[in-house]
Amino acid sequence: MSGPGPAKDAWLKTIPDGDTHERLVCPDCGYVEYDNPKIVVGAVCTWEERILLCRRAINPRKGFWVFPAGYLELHETTAAGACREAREEAGVEIEIDHLLAVYTIPRLSQVQLIYRARLPSADLNPGPETLEAELFRWDDIPWDDLAFPTVRWALTHHNELRGQSDFPPRGNPPGESADYLKKR
Amino acid sequence: MSGPGPAKDAWLKTIPDGDTHERLVCPDCGYVEYDNPKIVVGAVCTWEERILLCRRAINPRKGFWVFPAGYLELHETTAAGACREAREEAGVEIEIDHLLAVYTIPRLSQVQLIYRARLPSADLNPGPETLEAELFRWDDIPWDDLAFPTVRWALTHHNELRGQSDFPPRGNPPGESADYLKKR
């Protein structure tokens, strides 16, 4: 829904003048809804080779592990957004080091910009969106309990790029759909 | 406006339960508006060292020059979006080569992903959004008639990275606001 006007299923699906795509248009007032893909920003953050993961206190995927990430806000740079998410979810002030990955997930109309970052200390102070926050050694990462495929992608890419700088950001692994309901 | 309900200035600015930011909430039905930053995708495309630019037939900045770029559509990958824009604006099928730049423009709530691409031929077939399309040598680029600062940024970055591969994408030039109304 988009307000107290006619229900969304009464809206017209039509190509407005000068446009190239079908849009939803309100039959009462002619308002055109431009729905847009969303930008997710996040960071794989380390303290002495250990990786910060947070267990989600909210759905989707409550109880599963992620690195700090979320939707970019209006009037926010992508780096500032990644820092804000780390602050909100783990109570940490991160130092961004490099753009690690750009994932594009058309099924969800999402583009994810994932950074590599350092933690200034091992002090974590998780916020209300997080059940617990922990620093994991590579071998202890809870692979079977990660919240989304992109978490696995970014952790894997982070590990491949360990010690490197000046690299192009990684993209979707070949053949990966980012569908977490599908068997791996 | 967002439909035939109460005018937007009658909506409440409030932080919904469990949220961290103020949102516009309809006083009649409680609908929460989540407005999001937008993703622009585009490509600096070359044919034998010459760069494709299109003169805009639409506002903003009608009559000024850009490389093919525009808003990412729902359910589209970023690369597919850049190819679609080149098809729509210049009638060309491009071959994407590398992610050239990621610009973040908080004033406009925009993130731009700009690719480097090759043209298969010098045949251009501009669409209705384009007054004319042309292939420019570096020294002939109409610098004073570029539509947006990010066009200048991406052309400059493209030139700096000529002959290179495997580079990190460039970001905003230091101290640049992307405000085209401001004197350069």
Image (cartoon, coloured by chain):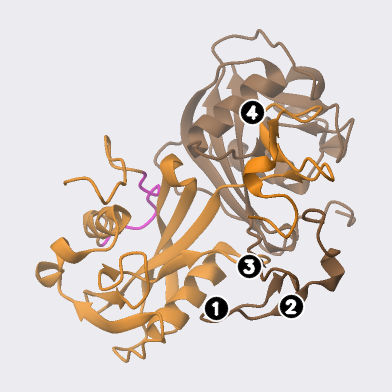
Chain colours: A orange, B brown
Q: Name the mark nearer the viewer: 2 or 3.
A: 2
The residue indicated by pointer 3 is A76
The residue indicated by pointer 4 is B85
Closer to us: A35 or A116: A35
Q: Which residue is painted at 55% across and 78% down in the image?
A: B19
Q: Name the mark nearer the viewer: 4 or 2.
A: 2
Closer to us: B140 or A121: A121
The verdict on a common chain for dots 1 and 3 is no
Q: Name the mark nearer the viewer: 1 or 4.
A: 1
Question: Looking at the picture, how far across and down is residue B99, in whole percent?
Answer: 49, 40
Task: Give the mark nearest the N terminus, 1 or 4.
Answer: 1
Q: Which residue is painted at 89% across and 53% down in the image?
A: B181
Secondary structure, mark 1, is loop
Residue B13 shows which numbered tag? 2
Viewer can see residue B182:
yes
Please name the amino acid that badge 4 sits on.
Glu
The residue indicated by pointer 1 is B19
- Pointer 3 with pointer 4, Cβ within 8 A: no
Please name the amino acid that badge 2 sits on.
Lys
The verdict on a common chain for dots 2 and 1 is yes
Secondary structure, mark 3, is loop
What is the magenta range?
A163-171
